[in-house]
Image: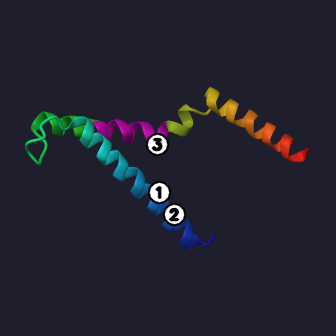
Amino acid sequence: MKVEDYFHANIAENHALLENLHDQCFTKCSKKTDIRYLTYDEGLCFRNCWNKFNNWYPRFEEQSRDAAFRTYFDMTMELEKDLKKQ
């Protein structure tokens, strides 16, 4: 993989993630469907939704370092390697 390909994949992944986040936060917070914009309370909800994600996502790897799903994932990978050997 070239550097340009990695950069493009990284940009595309971030775009898809943020577009989905925007849609989900907007859907969660927009209560009135008769207007095309957010009211003050809906805007606060939308802002808080983004802030929660911005605080959670950068720390996800650090906070889940010793999580159980990582242990099970590692065990599953070891079993798959053993099955491939046989």
- Mark before the other along the chain sequence, 3 or 1: 1
Is the residue under label 1 in contact with that under label 2 (CB below 8 Å)?
yes
Amino acid at the residue labelled 1: Glu
Q: Residue furthest top?
A: 68
Query: Between 7 and 78, which is closer to the camera in this rendering?
Result: 78
Residue at which label 2 appears? 9
Q: Magenta region: which residues? A: 49-59
| Residue that appears at 47% across and 57% down | 13
Residue 29: name its quadrant.
Answer: top left
Q: Secondary structure at mark 1?
A: helix
As shown in the figure, which amino acid type bears the numbered disc 3? Pro
Quadrant of the frame with the C terminus: top right
- Location of residue 36 in the rendering, given as x and y in whole percent from the top left corner: 11, 48
Q: Identify the image quadrant of the N terminus.
A: bottom right
CB under 8 Å between callouts 3 and 2?
no
Q: Label 3 to label 1, Cα distance in Å?
A: 15 Å
The secondary element bearing badge 3 is classed as helix
Q: Distance between the Cα atoms at labels 3 and 2?
A: 19 Å
**Residue identified by numbered label 1:** 13
**Residue that label 3 marks:** 58
* Of the two numbered discs 3 and 2 in the rendering, the one whose residue sits closer to the viewer: 2
Asked if one can make out residue 38 in the rendered structure from this viewpoint, the answer is yes
Whichever of callouts 3 and 2 sits on the residue coming sooner in the sequence is 2
Residue 70 position, x and y percent, is 65, 33
Residue at the image position 51 percent from the left and 67 percent from the top: 7
Tell me if residue 54 is in the magenta stretch: yes
Q: Position of residue 5 (x, y in %)?
A: 55, 70
Estimate how packed mark 3 is, as few (under 14), some (14 to 19) or many (20 or more) residues with alpha carbons within 10 Å. few
55 horizontally vs 70: left or right? left
Can residue 66 be seen here? The reply is: no
Which dot marks residue 50?
A: none
| Amino acid on which the number 2 mark rests in the picture | Ala
